[in-house]
Image (tube, coloured by chain):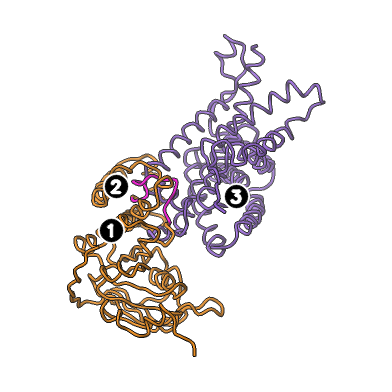
Amino acid sequence: MMFFLEVTISGLMAGVMYSLVALGFVLIFKASGVFNFAQGVMALFAGLTLVGLMEKFGLPPWAGIMATIAVMILLAWLIEFLILRRLVNQEHIILFMATIGLAYVLEGLGDVMWGSDVKLLDIGLPQGAVDWLLDDYNLYVEKLEVAAAVTAVIMVIVLAIFFQKTRIGRALRAVADDHQAALSVGISLRTIWVIVWSVSGIVALVAGIMWGSKSGVQFSLSLIALKALPVLMLGGFTSIPGAIIGGLIIGMGEKWAEIYMGPIIGGAIENWFAYMLALVFLLFRPQGLFGEKIIERI
Amino acid sequence: MSPEPVQTRIFEEEILSVSDVSLSFGGVKAIQNVSFDIKRGEIRAIIGPNGAGKTSMLNVINGFYHPQEGLIRFKGKARRRMRPSIAAAQGIARTFQNVALFKGMSTLDNIMTGRLPRLEKGIFGEIVNVFLQAAYLGPARRSELEQRKYVEEIIDFLEIQHIRRTPVGRLPYGLQKRVELGRALAMEPELLLLDEPMAGMNLEEKEDMSRFIIDVNDQYGTTIALIEHDISVVMDLSDRIIVLDYGRKIADGTPGEVQSNQAVMDAYLGVPHE
C-alpha cells in the first residue's frame, strides 16, 4: 500500500512538471490559436539564460530571475516584431511552421550564448526528501517536487484571476474568441501578442527553473515539450486547469504503467504510454477534458 | 414604428467625409468613386441591394479595409492606412451583420470589453499593468470599478439587466444584437456604425431596437451610420440616406428625396429590358 502511494505521488509530481510546460502552450494557443512548437525550447532558453547570467555576472538568484524575465519580455517583443506581425491573417499551419523555425533559432542562440554543456542550476530551492514523510511513513517525496507543485498551484490561481477579473485578461479572452470583434472594440492584436508571449515566456522560465534544478539545464529539456502534447490532448488545448489535470493524469498513468505493467511487457513503457493514452482519449473526447466543444453549423 | 413624418433636422458640422473612395479585391470592384459626408449628430442610412458595397463601406470607415483610392477625413483629419484599433481609439464603434460577440463570455464581460481602449498605455505600460493586474491591486482595481459603473448604466439603458451573467452564446438572436450595441456604446463612440441592426428580428424586437437607436442618438448625441434592409425602418429613423448599387452611389438625400428618385426605383425593382 505504501509502495502504491509512493508510486502515485511520484507520478503526480512528474505530472506537475509536464503541466508547467503545457501551461505555456495553452496560453499562446488560447490567444492566437497557434500551437507554439518552441515552448519547450523557450523553457530551455530561459533556464540557460538564468544560469548564464548568474555565472557570468555573479548575480544572486532573485536578480538573475528578474533579469531573465526582462530577457523573456524582450524576446516576446522581438518575436512579435520579426515574425508574428509579418504573418497576420496567414493560415495557422504557417504560424505553426514559423514556431518550428523559432525553436531551432532559439536553441542555436542559447548554444552560442551560453555553451552546450549541462549546467547546474541552483537558486536555493530545497533539495532532498521531505524528512517527516520519510521518517514517519517511510514515503520518499522530493522537496523540490513539492516546491514545483506549490508553484504550479500558485501560478494557476494567479492566471485564473488574471484571465477572469482583469481587463487585459478580458482582452485576451476577447481575442481568443473573435479576432474581428476584438479589433472593432479597439484591442490591438500586436499588444496582446506581446503580452501573451511574455506571460508564456515567464511560465517557460518557471518550467526551466524546476526542470533545471531537478536534472540540470541541458538540451534534452526541449524534448519535454513533446510530452506536453499528450497532456494537452487530454486536458484540452484551451484550458488552464486542463493543462494541470492532464499533466497529473499523464504523470500518474505513466508511473503506474511503468511499475505494474512494465515487468509484464518488458519496460520502457514511460516512453510511449502518454501518447497511447492521449490517442485513446482523442477517440472519445476530441476536445479534451476541459476544452471547448466545437459545434459547427453546416 | 411611429407613423408621423420625422421632422427635418439640420446639422452643420461634418464629422466624416469620404471623397472618391474606390476599393477592389483583385478584379472585383466593391466600391467605385463614392463620396459622401456624415454630419455630427445625424442618423445616416446606407441602403442598396445585396452586394452593393454597403458593408465594404463600413469596413473602410473603421479600418478593416484599405481603399486603393480616395480620401477619408474623420473629425477634420485626413488619414491614410487606418488600423481598426486606432479607429476605435479615435471614436468609431461598430456592430456586425452577423453578430460578432465573444460567445463564451457573459453579457457583462462582453460590454466591458468596450471599455478596454480607454486605458491604452503602449506595450510596455501594458506589461507593467499585467503585473499590477495579476496581483489585482491598486490603480488597476480602482479603474476596473469605475469602468464597471459605466457599463452598468448601459445595461440599464438597454434593459438587459436580467441577462447580465448569461454567456451570450446562449441568448436569442435579438438579445445578442442588443448586447452588441451595448458593447459599441461602452466605447463612448462619436460615430457609431450599425450593420443591419435589425436583421433577423421580429416586429417587436425591431421596434425595441429602433427605440434604442433613437434614444442613443438623442441622449448621448451619438452620430449614427446604419445599414438596413427594412425600408420602412430606414425612412422612419434616418435624417439622410445614401443609396449604393454595384459599388456606386446612385442617390443621396432626405428620405423624401430618395423615395422619389428614379434611379433608386430602378435599382430596387429592376429596369425593364427592351
Q: Which residue is mark 2?
A: B160
Q: Secondary structure at mark 2?
A: loop
Residue depicted at x 48% and y 77%: B30
Residue depicted at x 58% and y 25%: A127
Q: B237 and B69: which one is in front?
A: B237
| Image coords of residue A77 (percent x, y) | 50, 56
- Chain assigned orange: B
Measure the C-alpha gap from mark 3 to mark 2.
38 Å
Quadrant in which residue A5 is drawn: top right
Q: Amino acid at mark 2?
A: Ile
Q: Which residues are magenta?
A: B100-111
Res. A252 mark: none
Res. A35 mark: 3
- Chain assigned purple: A
Residue depicted at x 30% and y 46%: B144
Quadrant in which residue B167 is drawn: top left
Q: Chain of mark 1?
A: B
Marks 3, 2 in one chain: no
Position of A129 compared to B238: left or right? right
Q: Which residue is mark 1?
A: B207
| Image coords of residue B180 (percent x, y) | 36, 55
